[in-house]
Amino acid sequence: MPRPTGTHSDDALRVVDSAALARALPVGEAVEALRAALRAGLDVAATPPRSRVDTSTGQLLLMPAEYGQHAGVKIAGVVPGNPARGLPTVTGAYLLMDATTLRPTALLDGEALTLLRTSAVSALAADHLAAPDADRLVVFGTGPQAFAHAVALHQVRPLSAVRVVGRDPRRVDRFAERCEEAGITASAAAPDAVADADLIACCTSSATPLFDGRALPSHAAVVAMGSHDPGARELDTRALTSGTVVVEDTATALREAGDVVIPVEEGALRAASLVPLADVVCGRHPLADGRPRVFKGTGMAWQDLVVAAAAVSGTA
């Protein structure tokens, strides 16, 4: 039987709940763990694709990976109707194992881990794509990932202002209040606020573009993480063809990222032009100035593994 939350011993499964995860690994440290893994040679392309099973209310996802001394698997449920029930859209658990013996060593809260690793990956990308003085963020969405992204991006580019675009004015106001509580100035905005943004974070479940890509400033950096469905996208074709497009892994993006898949199928974007994030982080792909930079993430199992291992190390 697992020991009580937050405790461990050499012969027991360590249980890491959301509070313990937050204490063990602040988002800035998660960013550095991901950066270090990529620079150490982690082979992103070797990560197994996620398995999906449709259920009566959503999807069941299975995401295994192995790297270094660890292996692990996340079992996640994605239920679009959960927020109406007062529940998170993404739920689940992460099982961390010893890579040699495959003996389970820790069980982590899957929802909290997904929030942390997704926002940390976006912040890592933004740290390499955004201008050094970028400080004006427009965030689309008012849910947990949108707030996690505002906090994470504030770690890599201290923000002077956050403009929040959302459908429900009450949720926008609450989001702005949470930002203020975290020491970040925030206010409501319309989609055309991207014209004055340095950073843009798309954190929604929208299946259609959130703004007109023609409005992107030439110096802007965009991170989009709301979908891993090849038929859905938060960014229009213009946003993808106006600058450099960075992805976690080319094959994964062409399989799961509608933001990329749709313009490639239209013939407007060349698959060969996609830049793997590892190439940017490791300095193998210099970025041209004077054009927007877009990072499209879908979430990959190696990210969960790296962050889970770092968090468990922090609870030792």
Image (spheres, rainbow, N blue to C red):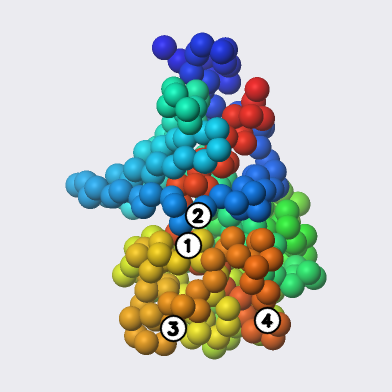
Q: Amino acid at mark 1?
A: Asp
Q: Is residue 314 above or below residue 32?
A: above
Q: Amino acid at mark 3?
A: Leu
Mark 3 and mark 4 lie on one chain; the one further toward the N terminus is 3
Mark 2 and mark 4 lie on one chain; the one further toward the N terminus is 2
Residue 201 image offset from top left, x and y in percent: 58, 65
Instruction: Give the Cα separation between the discs numbered 4 and 1.
Output: 20 Å
Mark 2 and mark 1 residues within 8 Å of each other at the beta carbon: yes
Q: Is residue 247 left or right of residue 52?
A: right
Mark 3 and mark 4 residues within 8 Å of each other at the beta carbon: no
Instruction: Give the Cα separation between the discs numbered 2 and 4.
Output: 24 Å
Residue 73 image offset from top left, x and y in percent: 41, 37
Report the mark closest to the observer, 2 or 4.
2
Q: Which residue is drawn at the image coordinates 62% and 36% (left, top)? A: 310
> Can you say which quadrant of the picture contains the C terminus?
top right
Mark 3 and mark 2 lie on one chain; the one further toward the N terminus is 2
Please name the residue that numbered disc 2 is placed on: 44
Q: Depth check: 300 or 239 in front?
A: 300
Q: Amino acid at mark 2?
A: Val
Report the mark closest to the observer, 3 or 1.
1
Could one spot residue 173 in this view of the protein?
no
Instruction: Give the Cα separation between the discs numbered 2 and 1.
Output: 7 Å
Q: Is residue 55 above or below residue 220?
A: above
Residue reaching furthest to the right: 133
Disc 2 on helix, strand or loop? helix
Instruction: Give the Cα separation between the discs numbered 3 and 4.
Output: 17 Å
Crowd band around label 4 with a 10 angstrom C-alpha radius: few (<14), some (14–19), many (20+): few
Please name the residue that numbered disc 3 is placed on: 269
